[in-house]
Amino acid sequence: MSQFFQFEADFVESLRCIPMQVRLKLDTCGIKLKLNQWHQFNPTERQALVDQPCESPEEILAYRKFLQNLVQERTGQPASELPIEMHPAWLNATEIPQQVQEKTQELNREMTLKAWENLTPVQRFALIKLSRPSH
């Protein structure tokens, strides 16, 4: 099931930007996909990257292969690879990352452990990514 965020609403239909759920899959399978590479994909291919599962070891490997083949076909070069985190913070519902705590305080908000626990992994992933200084 696809989960898009409200802040993605302006590009969900066209998928002109890489949605957070795909960014999560990229980090999960260790692929760095640039926006210009994403733009080489047709709408069906973009939707496939949204829909294809990427959770079990088999699904992660299949997603990685599918994506690398797609990038190679469209650009003539493989996508860059990223190290895969063995214990990514977005899968840890018992500890709020420091950068998320700092960002919520900066915005005069509070992130309780109970609230963090109730988030889905993609929601935690988005908060982690969006709490970085460059975002």
Image: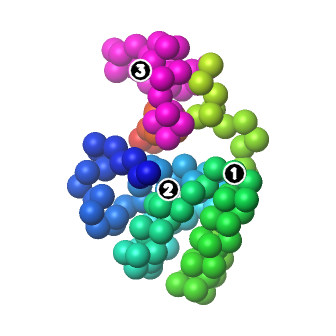
- Magenta stretch: includes residue 123: yes
Work out whether residue 97 or residue 25 is closer to the camera in this orientation and state it.
25
Disc on the earlier residue, 1 or 2? 2
Query: Pointers 1 and 3 in contact (CB under 8 A)?
Result: no
Quarter of the picture holding the C terminus: top left
Task: Point out residue 115 in the picture as x, y percentages from the top left corner.
Answer: 45, 18
Badge 3: how crowded within 10 Å, few (<14), some, or many (20+)? some
At horizontal 36% and vertical 48% (from top left) the residue drawn is 4
Residue range of the region highlighted in magenta in the rendering: 95-124
Task: Point out residue 24 in the picture as x, y percentages from the top left corner.
Answer: 54, 49
Which residue is labeled 2 in the image? Answer: 22
Look at the image and tell me whether residue 98 can be seen. Answer: no
Type of the residue with mark 2: Val
Type of the residue with mark 1: Ser
Badge 2: how crowded within 10 Å, few (<14), some, or many (20+)? many
Query: Pointers 1 and 2 in contact (CB under 8 A)?
Result: no
Task: Point out residue 51 in the picture as x, y percentages from the top left corner.
Answer: 47, 61
Work out whether residue 29 or residue 130 is closer to the camera in this orientation and state it.
29
Mark 1 or 2, closer to the camera = 1
Q: How is the image coloured?
A: rainbow
Which residue is labeled 1 in the image? Answer: 56
Q: Which numbered marker is on residue 104?
A: 3
At horizontal 49% and vertical 34% (from top left) the residue drawn is 120
Type of the residue with mark 3: Thr
Disc on the earlier residue, 1 or 3? 1
Q: Give left or right: position of 79 versus 108.
A: right
> Distance between the Cα atoms at labels 1 and 3?
32 Å
> Distance between the Cα atoms at labels 1 and 2?
15 Å
Of helix, strand and loop, which one carries label 2?
Answer: helix
At horizontal 31% and vertical 50% (from top left) the residue drawn is 8
Of helix, strand and loop, which one carries label 1?
Answer: loop
Q: Give left or right: position of 54 versus 45.
A: right
